Image: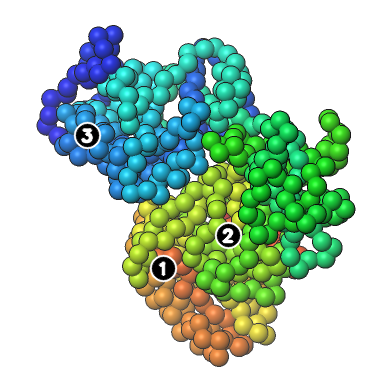
């Protein structure tokens, strides 16, 4: 940018000595665009080592603050421009407008207890403006003509503190603890009711993506609460619950504590329903009744053991997960595996396509499957916008439109719709995200051929070989091998995928990304070229009237927002098959379309 590097001037007092950026290894660079964030890896316990420092894990939205030429821009974790939504933060940042800066941090709201309150944050974001929104900065990536990402973390934080100081208000500095025993910091954070801690190597550079140089350990609490009501899953036999309403005793008053919507295996949901049946009453047992139209009220004689992340300012449990029934103090009746919560009635506007003949596995079966295969599956599914097949109250459908309440482990991406307006697509990047999708009834995952950091350009060419009635599997295999050879001749290194149905997908990764329109046009041209070699047996039209007795060369999987079933995704079909990556040697040997199921998944990533 041609500007001479400035010295970061102290804002918090004389203790923040001037600091020359070049002296700590910063490199001259022009002002960057959005930088993909560094994400910590989830661990059960934090590291115990003098080489690490520890920060409080703030409960909010990850954000990146850019200040350039006196103008502030705030980006979401995926690079969306959130300046309008976080205008008060942007305005406050312009108080340090004599600097060009990129800071990594968390947008959050502090509740009445002085702790970050995620529910309060969501309420504040719904307002046109809010003085309660704050940006808590924990890293400095760029300052006044210098890129600091290669500088050791401890030095980046020192400069950041000098820059922000103790100014207070909407821009804050996230301090750290330099203690050898990370477990001690973690235990104190949990005792205080915090979400957890983030531990970082002191000498680490800033690297985008999921990193082992940063780790996070989350706090969970566990206690028993009286059950005051349940919601029954409609239309199923034998009867079972969908969720429980919980209470909490305050002296001789019974007050509402929240709704446990997750953690029920099929067996547990049935057992709990049977146990609660004798306690059904016609009125709420709460000291101050609340309105819950779907609740079946009961006498509060049985307690539910739940895990939860904390308590909101309103006294409600954050993310309670059912773990079992407690009949007597210290005695658990059951310890069911975690599963997904039942959702409410399906609205017509949420149904893109009904799947009336679908058969779906139990939620605990899906949870077990994703736990087994997540490390392999995320190679194909992670970081991509998803189209979803959901199962809600006995209805299986491709989802469209507004989403239910989404667990925080599942990320949301705002996208511009071709017809105008804005939509939301979900994406995941870890096992917690995959399990979070189960909480809203997701069965199948259909990813875009693009990643969330570059959604307008495709990175893969996809051909779906979809046989009509009477087409034998052997002909499908023959076609796949011929199409492979054609693609190889024009420079593609392909791999095959069983769809979990009756077809094969041929996946052709692009050496350089292309626009979706360009990929669509190219795939169409290749498919029509191939079909012209035998028009009596191949068709490129999606019209059902033209497909009996022919093999449909489906190039329509290519295009902005169009999808194909995701690799490793289960299918809502009898036997619960899996869309599986295989090798061309497997295809040549005659592998069958139902070779893999959620009970018998592929053992390794095959390309």
Where is mark 2, residue-wise?
Answer: 445
Q: Residue furthest top?
A: 15
Where is mark 3, residue-wise?
Answer: 94
| Place of residue 261 in the rendered image (x, y in percent of width and height, measured from the top left) | 67, 50
Q: Which mark is residue 248?
A: none
Sequence order check, earlier mark of 3 and 1: 3
Q: Residue at x 50, y 82 (%)?
A: 542
Viewer-side residue, 30 vs 242: 242
Label 3 and label 2: CA atoms lie apart by 42 Å
| Element on which disc 2 rests | strand
Q: Nearer the viewer, mark 3 or mark 1?
A: 3
| Element on which disc 3 rests | helix
Disc 1 residue crowd, few under 14, some 14–19, many 20+, Cα 10 Å: many
| Element on which disc 1 rests | loop
Q: Residue at x 67, y 75 (%)?
A: 356
Can I make out residue 366 in this image? no
Q: Residue at x 65, y 45 (%)?
A: 288
Colouring convention used in this rendered image of the protein: rainbow
User: Where on the picture, by quarter, is residue 353?
Assistant: bottom right
Where is mark 1, residue-wise?
Answer: 559
Taking 340 as reference, is 98 left or right?
left
Q: Quadrant of the C terminus?
A: bottom right
Q: Are marks 3 and 1 in contact (CB under 8 Å)?
A: no
């Amino acid at each position: 940018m041609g500007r001479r590097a400035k010295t970061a001037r102290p804002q918090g007092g004389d203790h923040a000595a001037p600091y020359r950026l070049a002296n700590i290894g910063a490199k001259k660079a022009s002002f960057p665009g959005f930088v993909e964030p560094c994400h910590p890896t989830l661990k059960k316990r934090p590291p115990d080592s003098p080489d690490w420092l520890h920060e409080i894990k703030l409960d909010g939205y990850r954000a990146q603050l850019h200040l350039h030429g006196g103008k502030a821009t705030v980006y979401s974790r995926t690079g969306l421009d959130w300046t309008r939504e976080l205008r008060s933060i942007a305005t406050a940042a312009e108080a340090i407008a004599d600097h060009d800066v990129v800071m990594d941090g968390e947008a959050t709201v502090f509740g009445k207890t002085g702790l970050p309150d995620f529910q309060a944050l969501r309420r504040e974001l719904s307002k046109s403006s809010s003085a309660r929104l704050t940006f808590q900065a924990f890293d400095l990536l760029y300052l006044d003509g210098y890129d600091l990402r290669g500088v050791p973390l401890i030095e980046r934080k020192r400069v950041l503190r000098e820059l922000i100081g103790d100014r207070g208000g909407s821009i804050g500095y996230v301090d750290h603890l330099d203690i050898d025993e990370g477990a001690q910091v973690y235990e104190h954070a949990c005792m205080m009711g915090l979400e957890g801690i983030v531990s970082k190597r002191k000498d680490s550079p800033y690297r985008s993506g999921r990193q082992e140089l940063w780790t996070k350990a989350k706090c969970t609490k566990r206690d028993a609460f009286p059950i005051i009501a349940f919601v029954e899953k409609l239309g199923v036999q034998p009867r079972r619950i969908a969720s429980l309403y919980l209470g909490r005793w305050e002296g001789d008053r019974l007050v509402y504590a929240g709704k446990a919507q997750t953690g029920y295996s099929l067996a547990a949901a049935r057992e709990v329903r049977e146990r609660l049946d004798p306690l059904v009453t016609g009125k709420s047992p709460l000291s101050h009744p609340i309105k819950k139209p779907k609740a079946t009220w009961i006498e509060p004689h049985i307690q539910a053991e739940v895990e939860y992340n904390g308590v909101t300012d309103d006294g409600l449990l954050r993310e309670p997960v059912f773990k079992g029934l407690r009949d007597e103090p210290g005695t658990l009746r059951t310890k069911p595996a975690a599963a997904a919560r039942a959702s409410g009635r399906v609205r017509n506007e949420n149904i893109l396509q009904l799947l009336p003949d679908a058969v779906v596995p139990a939620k605990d079966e899906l949870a077990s499957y994703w736990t087994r295969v997540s490390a392999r599956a995320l190679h194909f599914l992670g970081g991509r916008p998803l189209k979803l097949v959901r199962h809600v109250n006995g209805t299986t459908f491709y989802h469209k439109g507004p989403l239910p309440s989404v667990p925080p482990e599942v990320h949301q991406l705002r996208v511009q719709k071709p017809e105008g307006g804005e939509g939301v697509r979900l994406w995941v990047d870890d096992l917690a995200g995959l399990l979070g999708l189960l909480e809203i009834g997701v069965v199948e995952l259909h990813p875009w051929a693009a990643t969330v950091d570059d959604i307008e350009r495709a990175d893969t060419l996809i051909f779906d070989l979809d046989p009509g009635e009477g087409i034998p599997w052997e002909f499908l295999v023959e076609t796949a091998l011929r199409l492979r050879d054609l693609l190889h001749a024009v420079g593609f290194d392909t791999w095959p995928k069983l769809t979990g149905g009756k077809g094969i997908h041929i996946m052709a990764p692009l050496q350089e990304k292309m626009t979706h329109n360009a990929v669509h046009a190219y795939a169409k041209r290749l498919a029509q070229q191939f079909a012209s070699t035998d028009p009596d047996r191949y068709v490129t039209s999606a019209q059902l009237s033209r497909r009996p007795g022919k093999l449909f060369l489906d190039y329509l999987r290519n295009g902005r927002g169009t999808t194909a079933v995701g690799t490793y995704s289960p299918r809502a079909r009898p036997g619960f098959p899996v869309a599986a990556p295989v090798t061309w040697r497997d295809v040549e040997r005659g592998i069958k379309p139902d070779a893999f199921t959620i009970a018998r998944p592929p053992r390794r990533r095959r390309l």
